[in-house]
Structure formats: structure tokens, C-alpha cells
Amino acid sequence: MDRRTVLRVGVLGAGTATFAGALWQQAFAAVAQPGPSPYGALLAADANGIQLPAGFTSRVIARSGQTVPGTSYAWHWAPDGGACFRSGTGWIYVSNSEIPVTGGASAIRFTADGSVASAYRILGGTNVNCAGGATPWGTWLSCEEVPLGRVFETWPDGSRQAEERTRLGRFKHEAAACDPDRRVVYLTEDESDGCFYRFVPDTWGDLRTGRVQVLCAPADQVAGPVTWRDVPDRDGIPVPTRLQVGAAKHFNGGEGCWYDRGTCWFTTKGDNRVWAYDAVNQRIDLAYDDNLVPAGTAPLTGVDNITGTSGGDLYVAEDGGNMEINIITPAGVVAPILRIVGQNSSEITGPAFSPDGRRLYFSSQRGTSGASAGSGGITYEVTGPFRA
């Protein structure tokens, strides 16, 4: 049997459980399958080169190396992971810069009507800042995607200098997601044999001290119970963190990470999967796998950054593929909700909703230029009738 058949028999034959988290409300009988989008079909590309469903519009917020309109600040190159934060009657969108040496992160502040009020730097002098995650106390965790990479805690409003959080482990960091119920931070690792970690702080809200643990399960397990074990040396010298615990489960290229109500969703780009960790019952399952849909029908490939909504929809961005953001609904339907045309040498990064859920921000990291340094990066906003 080929990989597709083996996976289908293994996952569906074993059976999987209903998730305790509210984000997956149906009986989990199978991975998400292609189906009609709740927003309808994509229309022809608009003036910004984005295909959207009826009722949705796009605008360009910023371009790498150019001044953000309405400000005097030049937007960073290679925009990557991002998140939105409330700010008075408006909000702030934070975006990482995935370039060497200077890296860091920038922010754009919006007024209540969506106008740009200001733009500024919140982190600099770091290395290849890829993804990260927001904390419940309103800070942004910016992660370095390099060997022995670090995590930096930043303040979106620029009120404080960023602070290094090396107690979260030194490895090729990708994304982070906070679980306020168990008071831990989940972390992905972008290695072909990477691991899925969690940081258990000594005091919730203070990430300066605590333990790093790694998820453990049989190597071939795609559905079933898991355990956690402490990583002996979080600094990863001389033995990388992912190789220190023999029972650790390895994942093929950890990418995005998103937590909500008992479930932590994380993606692996090497095998185009979306995983679901049921934090209540401590088990993992597959939410999506492009090898577990009918051949030739996979709408989601190049699985990368992920975000979600209060209503339970997941939004997954593609690195490559055909430059789409796909929705995965609680009913298990996966479908594209937007597509960028003419930028096949780029990737979509940093999807994040404004606090009111009406605007979706994201970037095309290399834009139309496709330049590896990310000098052609473009950051967009899409407005429309997104589901609550």
C-alpha cells in the first residue's frame, strides 16, 4: 500500500475520539475533507491580486522597505508571524521579520475605524524571527528560527524594551501558543525531526523561570494518548533538545500553533498535516492530512501558519502551494477563503484577526519579486462578513 492508503487505514481503522475542546464540536470520525466554503466560491482577482468570496475586499497595508502609508516608518523585510492586540478603541498588528542578524518585529497601530495611526519597531538585533504567539497578558512572543534560537517577549505598544526568554528552550523555534487553563506555553520546532514542547512556568504570567517538557508518544502514532517529560538541558548544548529524550515523538517540520478551549492545533509542513492536541485528555489526533483526502483534491498544501476564531473556524496559510489561506470548519470541511495570484515564489504568513473579528491581516513574505531576502514583502488586510 502507498502512504495515502496506509495512513487512511491506520487512522480510520483505529478510530479517534471526540475532542473535549469546543473548537472541534463534531464526533471526530475522520480528518477534514474538501467541501464547499461557508463563504462561497472565490471570485476573480481584485486590483491587489487577491481572489476573495463575494462581499470581501482587500487593501495593502505595508510594503517591505517602503514607508507605511500615514507614518514615517519603513516596513521590515520578509514579514512573517503576526498577531493582533487591543489598543484603546483600536488595535495593533504585530509582525516578525524573518531575516538574519537584524530580524526583530514591527507593529502597526490602527484607530477604531481601521485607519493607520502609527508604525514602529518593537524588537531588533535578533536572528530570523519566524513565527511566535500572543500571551493572555498582551505581549508578543517572537521566535528565532535558527539552531539554538531564542524566544523574546515584546510589548506591542512599544512601552517596554523586549526581553529574552531563554528558559523557554534553545532550538529552532517556530510558533508558540499559550494555554491559560493548564498555564503552559506550547512550542513548535521547525526541524524535519523536530518536537512539540511545552513550557511550564513557575508563575503564570512570568516566563523567566520554569520547565521545558517534550511530548512523548510512539513514533508512528497519529492518534492516541501522549505523555510529557522534562528536557534535561533546555540550552541544547552539546545535545539538541529534540534528541535528549528517547521517548520524544518527532514531527516533520513544526510550523503554526493555536490554542483555544482545550485544544492546541499545530501544523507540520513536511507532511502537510494539521494536528490537534487534546489538552484535557492528553492525546493527539490528525485534523487534516493531504494524504487522507481523495487523490488530487487536497485544497490545502504547504501547511504553515494557523489562527482561529471564537466560533471555532481554523485558518491555515500556505507556504507555496497555490498561495491560499484555507478554512477548516468545526464540521470538518476544508476550503480556500482567499488566494493570491502572481506570487508563486512567495508564502503567506502571519494570519491574524482584528479583535472584533472583521478584518484579517496577513503577509506575502516575498511578494511579486520572489526575492529570497523578502525585500518584496507585502502586508494585507481583508475585510468582510467573517463568521463570528
Image (spheres, rainbow, N blue to C red):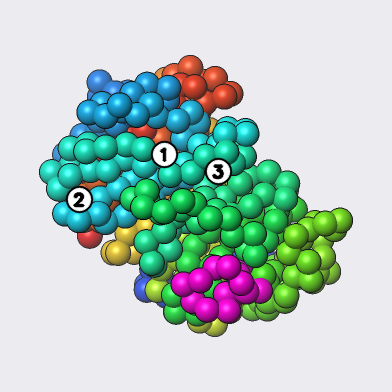
Q: Amino acid at mark 3?
A: Cys
What's the residue at 16%, 54% (across, down)?
89
Q: Can you identify the residue that label 2 sits on?
A: 90
Labelled disc at residue 121: 1
Cα distance between the residues tagged 1 and 2: 18 Å
* Mark 1 / mark 2, whichever is N-terminal: 2
Does 56 appear above or below 236?
above
* Mark 2 / mark 3, whichever is N-terminal: 2
Labelled disc at residue 130: 3
Q: Nearer the viewer, residue 290 or 50?
A: 50
Residue 344 visible, this orientation:
no
Does 274 appear above or below 200?
above
> Residue 259's x, y, as percent?
45, 65
Label pair 1/2, CB-CB below 8 angstroms: no
Q: Which residues are magenta?
A: 197-211
What's the residue at 37%, 57% (across, down)?
308
Cα distance between the residues tagged 1 and 3: 16 Å
What's the residue at 34%, 29% (across, down)?
73
Question: Quick one: label 1, few (<14), some, or many (20+) residues within 10 Å?
Answer: some
- Tell me the element at label 3: strand
What's the residue at 25%, 50% (across, down)?
91
